[in-house]
Image: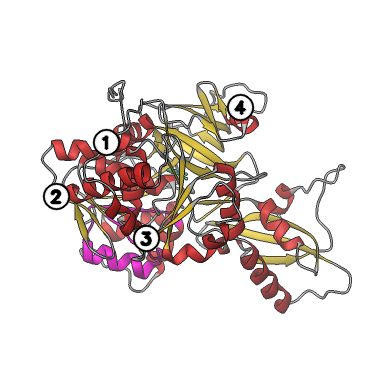
């Protein structure tokens, strides 16, 4: 299939386009967002975005290309701050709301963001940063009502704001991406990336359209959620439902029943736990037209059970923070569960073997590399990792794939040791370091392990120091210890005590031997 032709003018501001196209199309009075507190028309969104752009530039004195960090729960303040910054030529950095104080300190320092917009629930983690991170001048509280609140800041801004005169290739926003070693990397996207994902994937493959109500359980701070709940609905003039709380099955069922979305976006762990929940809606209770899954491979059985229950397929696909959204996907009428489908037209994919040669034989796995117009341009402050990942036309994914005899792509693991847990990367090395910080632990190795739904979770193999006895109490203590040090979703679900760990002659842990144990 030929990809659509996407024409982007020489002067282009992504926020101005995503909002302006709806006003021009006469959708000002239509609901753009429904969050936990109310609903907002496209006109209201446009005014909030203008006020935010104006306040960031004039009240706070931010300059074009300055960074503003956002640690914001899903709700109207997210699109307001994200698009407001972009419209003002300021670069927003949307970060994971589930991390620790030290993760946040790192990101604030690395990005040198002058302002951070933070949900009031997360403020205790950020308050100590003022004074500690020298480049941070101001915290703005989303969801609050006081003088430091986003609401108060918006009140100082103007309802009219001429978009910053950006070009398609200017830095637009960042997301942080994690690797197996080293600190998270500020992944820099440019203005033209957003609309490319909407026009190449969301409109033709997902089939999103103006009349749709969409609901993403994946949060806006993930690249997957950002496309689902912000870029795609605004690109076509649809309505998006936002939910601040954790996407538990109960919270998701409530939104599905009350809001009756046409499109639901989830991740495999959530689909599996929804299907296993006694309150899962019955066939006929929902009017879903399309569902998507990404983040990790969707187990075949989960896809088939969902289809049998709701009469709608889950379109499993894969994307990345670096490519911004999905470049390989199943599509309606051509769903092959157990595969990630076929390339999205507009993206080229290739598989590379360990010698650097392209694989052309069906069934042989290699590293997946992608060429397409939504690729990030660099990792901030990180020339080495930039050069290793963005290799000219091709962006390396770190995922291994094979193409089966019928031409569908099948996931074959990672080329590094990274795990994807509920769609979020977890570095085994980080979890191992946390375990080793416990007084009883001599050595630790962490690998991905399949749970009963065939989904990957961290499992730890632990060698104890002399004098410490293995047992259930220590297991519980070690899990609590990791949850204390790291974002809680990273904790090992299983801990096995062993006498030693398999290692190479040079002392490197051979995690692959534990995976197959
Ligand atoms: O993990 C994925 O598959 C994904 C999909 C869309 C956008 C971003 C990511 C990481």
The quadrant in which the C terminus is found is bottom right
Between marks 2 and 1 in the image, the one whose residue lies nearer the viewer: 1
Task: Please report the residue visible at 14 percent of the width from the left and 50 percent of the height from the top.
Answer: 30
Residue 246 included in the magenta stretch of the image? yes
> Which residue is disc 3 drawn over?
149
Residue 431 included in the magenta stretch of the image? no
Q: Judge the density around disc 1: few (<14), some (14-19), many (≥20) Cα neighbours within 10 Å.
A: many
Q: Which mark is residue 16?
A: 1
In the displayed structure, 335 sits above or below 78; it is above
Q: Which type of secondary structure does the marked residue at label 3 adopt?
A: loop
Q: Judge the density around disc 2: few (<14), some (14-19), many (≥20) Cα neighbours within 10 Å.
A: some
Mark 1 CB lies closer than 8 A to ligand 1: no
Task: Please report the residue visible at 73 percent of the width from the left and 75 percent of the height from the top.
Answer: 474
Q: CA distance from mark 1 to mark 3?
A: 24 Å
Sequence-first tag of 3 and 4: 3
Mark 3 CB lies closer than 8 A to ligand 1: no
> Which residue is disc 4 drawn over?
387
Q: What residue range appears in magenta?
A: 241-268
Q: CA distance from mark 3 to mark 4?
A: 40 Å
The quadrant in which the N terminus is found is top left
Between marks 1 and 3 in the image, the one whose residue lies nearer the viewer: 3
Sequence-first tag of 1 and 3: 1
Q: CA distance from mark 2 to mark 1?
A: 18 Å
Q: Which type of secondary structure does the marked residue at label 2 adopt?
A: loop
Task: Please report the residue visible at 80 percent of the width from the left and 69 percent of the height from the top.
Answer: 439
The image shows residue 479 at horizontal and vertical percentages of 65, 69
356 vs 230, nearest the viewer = 230
The image shows residue 480 at horizontal and vertical percentages of 64, 71
443 vs 108, nearest the viewer = 108
């Amino acid at each position: 299939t030929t990809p659509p032709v996407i024409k982007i003018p020489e002067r282009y501001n992504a926020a101005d386009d995503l909002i302006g196209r709806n006003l021009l199309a006469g959708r000002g009075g239509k609901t753009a967002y429904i969050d936990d507190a109310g609903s907002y028309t496209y006109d209201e969104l446009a005014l909030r975005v203008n006020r935010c752009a104006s306040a960031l530039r004039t009240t706070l004195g931010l300059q074009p290309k300055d960074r503003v960090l956002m640690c914001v729960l899903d709700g109207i303040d997210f699109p307001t701050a994200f698009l407001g910054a972009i419209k003002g030529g300021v670069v927003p950095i949307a970060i994971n709301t589930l991390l620790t104080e030290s993760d946040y300190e790192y990101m604030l320092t690395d990005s040198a963001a002058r302002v951070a917009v933070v949900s009031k629930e997360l403020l205790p983690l950020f308050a100590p940063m003022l004074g500690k991170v020298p480049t941070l001048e101001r915290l703005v509280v989303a969801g609050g009502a006081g003088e430091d609140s986003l609401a108060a800041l918006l009140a100082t801004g103007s309802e009219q704001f001429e978009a910053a005169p950006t070009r398609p290739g200017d830095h637009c926003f960042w997301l942080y991406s994690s690797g197996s070693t080293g600190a998270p990397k500020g992944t820099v996207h440019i203005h033209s990336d957003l609309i490319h994902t909407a026009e190449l994937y969301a409109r033709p493959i997902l089939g999103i359209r103006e009349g749709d109500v969409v609901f993403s359980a994946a949060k806006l701070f993930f690249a997957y959620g950002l496309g689902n709940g912000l870029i795609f609905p605004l690109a076509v003039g649809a309505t998006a439902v936002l939910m601040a709380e954790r996407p538990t099955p109960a919270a998701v069922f409530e939104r599905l029943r009350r809001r009756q979305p046409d499109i639901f976006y989830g991740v495999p762990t959530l689909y599996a736990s929804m299907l296993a929940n006694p309150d899962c809606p019955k066939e006929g209770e929902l009017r879903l037209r399309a569902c998507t899954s990404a983040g990790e491979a969707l187990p075949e059985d989960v896809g088939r059970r969902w289809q049998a229950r709701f009469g709608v397929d889950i379109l499993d696909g894969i994307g990345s923070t670096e490519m911004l959204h999905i470049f390989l996907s199943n599509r309606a009428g051509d769903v092959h569960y157990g595969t990630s489908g076929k390339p999205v037209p507009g993206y080229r994919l290739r598989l590379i073997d360990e010698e650097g040669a392209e694989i052309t034989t069906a069934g042989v796995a290699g590293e997946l590399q992608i060429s397409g117009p939504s690729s990030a341009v660099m990792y901030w402050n990180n020339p080495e990792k930039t050069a290793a990942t963005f290799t000219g036309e091709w962006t390396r994914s770190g995922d291994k794939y094979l193409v089966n005899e019928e031409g569908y792509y099948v996931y074959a693991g990672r080329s590094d040791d990274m795990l994807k847990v509920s769609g979020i990367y977890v570095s085994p090395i980080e979890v191992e370091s946390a375990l080793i910080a416990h007084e009883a632990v001599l050595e630790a190795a962490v690998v991905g392990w399949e749970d009963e739904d065939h989904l990957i979770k961290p499992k730890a193999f632990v060698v104890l120091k002399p004098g410490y006895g293995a047992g259930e109490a220590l297991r519980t203590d070690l899990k609590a210890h990791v949850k204390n040090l790291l974002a809680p979703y990273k904790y090992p679900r299983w801990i096995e005590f062993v006498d030693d760990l398999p290692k190479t002659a040079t002392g490197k842990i051979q995690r692959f031997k534990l995976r197959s144990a």
